[in-house]
Image (cartoon, rainbow, N blue to C red):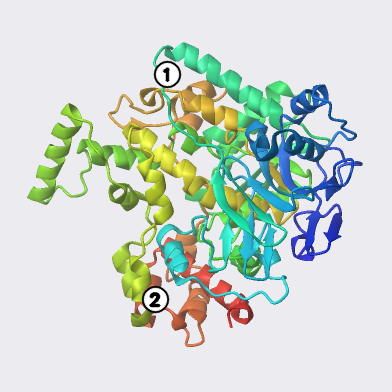
Amino acid sequence: MTDALKHRGPDGEGIWLNKNVAIAHRRLSIIDLESGKQPMSNEDGKIWITFNGEIYNYRELRKELQRKGHVIKSQSDTEIIIHAYEQWGDNCVNNFRGMFAFGIVDNKKKRVFLARDHLGIKPLVYYKSENCFAFASEIQSLLRVNDIKLKMDLRSLDQYLWMQYIPAPRTIFSSTFKLPPAHRMSITFDGKWSKPEEYWKFSFKLNHQKDEKEWLEELEAVLKNSVKAHLVSDVPFGAFLSGGVDSSTIVALMSQILDKPVKTFSIGFMEKEYNELEYAEIAAKKWHTDHHVKIIKPDAIALLAKIVNHYGEPFGDSSAIPTYYVSELARSYVPMVLSGDGGDETFAGYDSYRYWKKYLTGEDKSKQNSRFDLLSRLVRKIVNKYAKREYSLGEWLQFINYMPHDMRSNLWRKEYKSNSDFPLDFFENEFKRTKNFGSINKVQYMDLKTYLPFDILTKVDIASMMHGLEVRTPIIDKEVLEFASTIPESLNYQKDNDGEWQGKLLLKKIAEKYYPKNLIYRGKRGFAIPVQSWFQKDGALYEEINERILTKNSALEEYFEPESMKKIVESGNSGHIWLLLFLEEWLRQNQRVLT
């Protein structure tokens, strides 16, 4: 199992075994390079831990635990988790500020305790059967367990087609699960396990007592505090710099804190419409960073087999490829970087929010030809003006679903069509919690609980750790999130002078102190690759797509109708094509496991 994770921890390994319980660790050394080796135990060897991540407030916790009588030998944040568990038990997680996934073996209570961080920055997957319980950072490690028996969960596969990822707690295998963010669980040495339990609930609690100037000052201070906390390290570090508002703001704050130039890393494309290097260059020149750039060409598809192997299950976000390349670039200089991930969810920056707002206010012009739709927009306007309307999950899903129900239903072979009728249970449970939230806070919450951990953070963790690179996310910080949850919706989301809805306004106003407006108030591009041009009929990769998806030896034919797949390929819809391309490679790689 540790051999399968060598890329995540190139600096060393350790194994601890006692009868029918064993834990192991692959180490990426960031803090306390000498005495931070794992698995690590307390003084009497009764408690052992394997831990992935960083605890940013470990120094403060160290002092508190020492005052309570704990003897702490190392400078490692790992040892702090052990003593925090001794002091507070399962509630220790409530005191941690950081990114973490860990397993603690408690020989006193004869059980293993597992926990994952508040936002799901670090992964934790587990397998359970009558004879075995195993956990790891990646699914490919679980595949090394002796006598493992795996069956593909076709309903999870449909969720992949629907959302481009598989939401927790499901994985592609029916006996393998993801521990959701902000959850903990335990299993006794004789195999009795407790179901995952949520230990932290995020909610919006708006504060209307401050003016905009106060919010701007306090938000910048909170962000700077988080960046400073995330810079705790005993190794060199840098920053991803895409040229967007989020990463550019992080670089600005880092540059003010540090006394030497920040190492920054960007990737670009030959296709101009996807290339944001000119904006990254503005930020790099402003702060005199040590800037490094890599251009990606269509041969990036050659990475497919490697990427599929590491993600362990179908994962349809094609920006895993540029994330792989920028991580590879950064790792050739430093073992750790900061990124701007989470800005859109935290401060309402996605285009989908704009479309959602237009829909709710009747500004959506896409259906004006229908008299019924015109009437429904008028009704929405009246209802929204005079009463608090209950928005449905179905309404929101139409803005974010990747492959609609009819298309999925037509894609499945006849004997499998029932899988496309399965509800997104995790989404439904979370949506119930948004009942009293405003319209934008409602969808922010949904993205924070679903798209962020299951797509964005999964993508970044796997792609970066393929190179043994640690990525830290100061915007996705418990204290930043709790502060941001108090900001009135109207301060983050308003109409501009042209009557267009704009999000992330407070963060953009902070960025105005450092950058020109053409960097801040331009159209959002996202971290995408030019698959649209690569996949079309005269594109660089069209022949390869046909070979993989439409030939008779395609692994997809067992599940999907060939004519429906042909329509998808000929449509040129790059998102849908990528879903099939990734899945076909995954099926090929896992034929042995699935038989």
- Looking at the image, is mark 2 or mark 1 nearer the viewer? 1
Q: Which quadrant of the structure image shows residue 340?
A: top right
Residue under numbered circle 1: 207
For mark 1, give the secondary structure: loop
Residue under numbered circle 2: 565
Extreme bottom residue here? 552
- Horizontal and vertical percent for residue 475? 58, 33
Label 1 sits on what residue type?
A: Asn
Using a 10 Å C-alpha cutoff, classify the residue at mark 2 as few (fewer than 14 neighbours), some (14 to 19) or many (20 or more).
many
- Horizontal and vertical percent for residue 281? 62, 36
For mark 2, give the secondary structure: helix
Inter-mark Cα distance, 2 to 1: 50 Å
Q: Quadrant of the N terminus?
A: bottom right
Q: Residue at x 69, y 77 (%)?
A: 147
Q: Residue at x 66, y 31 (%)?
A: 95
Circle 2/circle 1 CB separation < 8 Å: no
* Nearer to us in this view, 473 or 185: 185
* Nearer to us in this view, 545 or 235: 235
* Image height of 451 relative to 576, above or below: above
Extreme left residue here? 371
Q: Residue at x 54, y 37 (%)?
A: 200
- Horizontal and vertical percent for residue 569? 40, 72
* Nearer to us in this view, 330 or 168: 168
Residue 286, visible in the rendered structure: no
Numbered mark located on residue 336 in the image: none
* Image height of 182 relative to 57, above or below: below
Q: Which quadrant of the structure image shows residue 64?
A: top right
- Horizontal and vertical percent for residue 130? 63, 70
Residue 455, visible in the rendered structure: yes
Label 2 sits on what residue type?
A: Met
Using a 10 Å C-alpha cutoff, classify the residue at mark 1 as few (fewer than 14 neighbours), some (14 to 19) or many (20 or more).
few
Q: Quadrant of the C terminus?
A: bottom right
